[in-house]
Image (cartoon, rainbow, N blue to C red):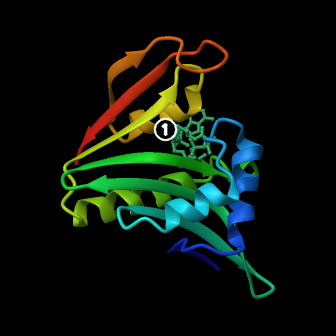
Amino acid sequence: MREISIFSGGILAENLVGICRQTKTAAPWTGKDFQTEAGQKTSRIFILTDKKDNQKIPLAFCACRFVFESAEITNFAVSPLYQRKNFGTELFNHTLNFLRNQGVKEVTLEVSSANISAQKFYEKFKFTCVSVRKKFYNMGEDALLLKLNL
Ligand SMILES: CC(C)(COP(=O)(O)OP(=O)(O)OC[C@H]1O[C@@H](n2cnc3c(N)ncnc32)[C@H](O)[C@@H]1OP(=O)(O)O)[C@@H](O)C(=O)NCCC(=O)NCCS
């Protein structure tokens, strides 16, 4: 059974690190990064899990930070085996609804110019590119700053 919950620390952090490693284009957070982020009042990490043999298996996560009317998506990934099954959409909608309920009016995020699948994903949510940081990443790709008014 699938469900969305808030990651509040603990052993699932290693599964989330695994998702980052497998996808390669997610921010390469360590277990400590996930734990620290989960402990911040102005951050949330939502996880989409499946239950198998009474164990929760994370399939995807979406991390955000929010201050007053602004929020940032700080990391987001779906495990490669589960991509293109609408799970990203389900989790991202959940995150945006949470932010709306917090009074957030503007959401930003950063994506590499080489990450076409993520750009297509955000286009579907009507994000628009508001600025470009040239050669921001190690391999010389630009960073695109995307924005959505909620
Ligand atoms: C971006 C990501 C989270 C999307 O998650 P997902 O569950 O695969 O996405 P969905 O199945 O909900 O797809 C929704 C829409 O996004 C677009 N999309 C998603 N993956 C795509 C791909 N590989 N190629 C083209 N469009 C894609 C499509 O428009 C898709 O709608 P459609 O299937 O009806 O055509 C996922 O590809 C991922 O984890 N990528 C690696 C990590 C990453 O790059 N994170 C973002 C960092 S900024």
Q: Closest to the observer: 51 or 9?
A: 9
Residue 2 position in % (x across, y down): 61, 75
Residue in view at x 45 percent, y 33 percent:
110
Name the image quarter holding residue 21: top right
Q: Closest to the observer: 14 or 58?
A: 14
Residue 40 position in % (x across, y down): 43, 65
Q: Is residue 149 above or below residue 101?
A: above
Query: Label 1's element?
Result: helix
> Within the displayed image, which quadrant is ligand 1 positioned in?
top right
Residue 24 position in % (x across, y down): 71, 37
* Left or right: 144 as drawn, with respect to 36: left
Read off the residue under disc 1.
Answer: 121
For label 1, being within 8 Å of ligand 1 is answered: yes
Q: Is residue 35 above or below residue 137?
A: below
Q: Identity of the amino acid at label 1?
A: Phe
- Structural crowding at the residue carrying mark 1, measured as other residues with C-alpha within 10 Å and reported as few (<14), some (14–19) or many (≥20): some
Residue in view at x 60 percent, y 55 percent:
33
Residue 72 position in % (x across, y down): 37, 46
Residue in view at x 51 percent, y 66 percent:
38
Which residue sits furthest bottom?
Answer: 54
